Image (tube, coloured by chain):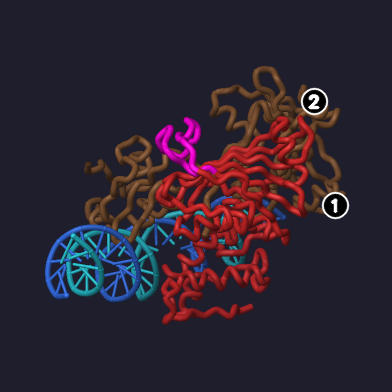
Chain colours: A brown, B red, C blue, D cyan
DNA sequence: TCAATGCGTATGTCCGGACAATCGGACCGC
DNA sequence: GCGGTCCGATTGTCCGGACATACGCATTGA
């Protein structure tokens, strides 16, 4: 019952974060079962030698993640839901790798082009100014799965074709010190044109899943704009949305 | 320059929330322009007669919303991004109404059925037990736009056909005191079957956008499971994803 | 001229306490 | 038996202060 919680005050890791991690691990591990009370904050703080605000900060971070629910006069309990996968800015490459597949990438185009009006508007750049353009084909089991065309503002990143084939675009951006923050996505469907059909190994007129996305870093700067088409038999979008009051 | 901020201590609305609302309004209204500094927290607290933790709580809530960025040693500034629409658990009805369209709904089925294995698993109910089943057709400008089949756990809500045609399912649930919290969605595409094509006024084999969703309330209980098909020429999903570190 | 150092400033973390609001159950009266 | 009321428990809000940490800039030194 009484969890094995402790904090290391000599660690540079914030105390509230240490506690949050341990609580999250306990939930994931099953030591804290869904619906079980967490014990009141005051006592928890006393037991750990922390102040109540610190304990609250830890709990609050897990509430924000959707793992805990607070109810005044009752206490804090673990949510019943089994699905508590975090909603994430989905990276196709990471998704596939997590699913145990080994995605292959073929870079079709990696160059600098003048920005069209659409791209310039999405990236907040000047129309006709230089932008990077990358076209890639993603394959699984030797079969094409997605065709992706991405634009990046100039000077943001050195796009090495070899690296692009070995890993995902998001991972390269993170490695370059860019903190991805949010993305605006539009997902739709349409019939494949002749060119798209041939690229993806489908018949002309076959249904395609389309996605258009602009990604922003933590300063609100647009760092990527992309237009993707997916073979719906091989890929669908799966994610969790949180309600923001 | 100096914003017209003030708080009402006699109001039951929390002080940090009052401040957050005023700051958000100032940003939306343009009084705080993208990139501009917010002024340091200490002075802001002194000016408003609040303590620093209260001011921080207000600022933090806006940081979580993606409107502000904090940088240590620099200050807090408004993000540059123009798109700061909140990500929301999209309600088709609300989306359409916000877009100025007057959606019409035709309830095809509103009954209680035994749960199939799939529905039971999604709702966390017993297989074969009672669940509500609602089939609806959503129309805009007299043309069908989406076909929606939803399941709800028993005893959660009285589903009145008249109300269902007048408003959206989410709005009914909120009105019944259910606090929607998160949803797990899967979006894909496929060719329309003969039955789907006829329902939606498309040709057989035409591309359809499909969505499957399970919605949870704030206690983690599944409150709705639905399978929807959309005409891609008339609807696409648009939303904002936040990265969770 | 250019790089390393130091300093001011702002946010990040943490503390200890106080009172209010709300929930649930126990108690009491009818 | 039943309903309303009171009360303990727990989270929600707010305060004032303290020190740590990181960023940007000016100064200093080579």
Question: Is residue B123 in the magenta section?
Answer: yes
Point 81% across, 35% down: residue: A111
Residue labelled with disc 2: A199
Point 66% across, 55% down: residue: B95
Q: Which residues are magenta?
A: B112-133
Where is residue B34 drawn, in percent x and y?
67, 64
State the residue in front, A20 or A111.
A20
Where is residue B60 drawn, in percent x and y?
49, 62
Outermost residue on the top side: it is: A142
Q: Can you see residue A166?
A: yes
Q: Is C22 left or right of B169, judged from the image as shown? A: left
Q: Quadrant of the N terminus of chain B?
A: bottom right
Local packing at callout 1 (Cα closer than 10 Å; few below 14, some 14-19, many 20+) is: some
Subunit that carries the residue with mark 2: A
Where is residue A236 drawn, in percent x and y?
63, 33
Check if mark 1 and mark 2 are on a common chain: yes
Task: Give the structural element (helix, strand or loop) at label 1.
Answer: loop
State the residue in front, A216 or B131.
B131
Point 73% across, 59% down: residue: B101
Numbered disc in front, either 1 or 2: 2
Compared to B238, does A146 lie above or below?
above
Residue A109 figure quarter: top right
Compared to A182, does B116 lie above or below?
above
Residue B192 figure quarter: top right
Residue labelled with disc 1: A127
Q: Can you see residue A175?
A: no
State the residue in front, A19 or A212.
A212
Q: Exactly how many numbered labels are in the figure?
A: 2
Local packing at callout 2 (Cα closer than 10 Å; few below 14, some 14-19, many 20+) is: some
């Amino acid at each position: 019952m009484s969890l094995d919680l402790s904090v290391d005050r000599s660690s540079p890791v914030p105390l509230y974060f240490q506690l949050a991690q341990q609580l999250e691990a306990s939930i994931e591990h099953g030591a804290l079962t869904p619906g079980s009370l967490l014990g009141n904050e005051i006592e928890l703080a006393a037991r750990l030698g922390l102040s109540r605000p610190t304990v609250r900060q830890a709990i609050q971070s897990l509430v924000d993640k959707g793992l805990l629910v607070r109810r005044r006069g009752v206490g804090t309990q673990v949510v019943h839901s089994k699905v508590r996968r975090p909603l994430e800015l989905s990276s196709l490459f990471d998704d596939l790798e997590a699913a145990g597949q080994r995605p292959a990438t073929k870079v079709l185009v990696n160059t600098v082009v003048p920005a069209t009006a659409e791209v310039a508007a999405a990236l907040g750049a000047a129309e006709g100014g230089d932008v990077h353009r990358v076209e890639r084909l993603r394959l699984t089991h030797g079969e094409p799965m997605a065709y992706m065309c991405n634009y990046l503002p100039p000077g943001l990143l050195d796009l090495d074709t070899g690296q692009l084939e070995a890993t995902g675009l998001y991972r390269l951006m993170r490695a370059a010190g860019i903190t991805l923050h949010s993305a605006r996505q539009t997902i739709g469907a349409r019939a494949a044109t002749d060119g798209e059909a041939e690229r993806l190994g489908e018949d002309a007129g076959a249904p395609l899943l389309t996605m258009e996305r602009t990604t922003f870093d933590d300063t609100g700067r647009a760092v990527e704009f992309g237009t993707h088409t997916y073979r719906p038999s091989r890929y669908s979008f799966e994610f969790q949305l949180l309600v923001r009051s």
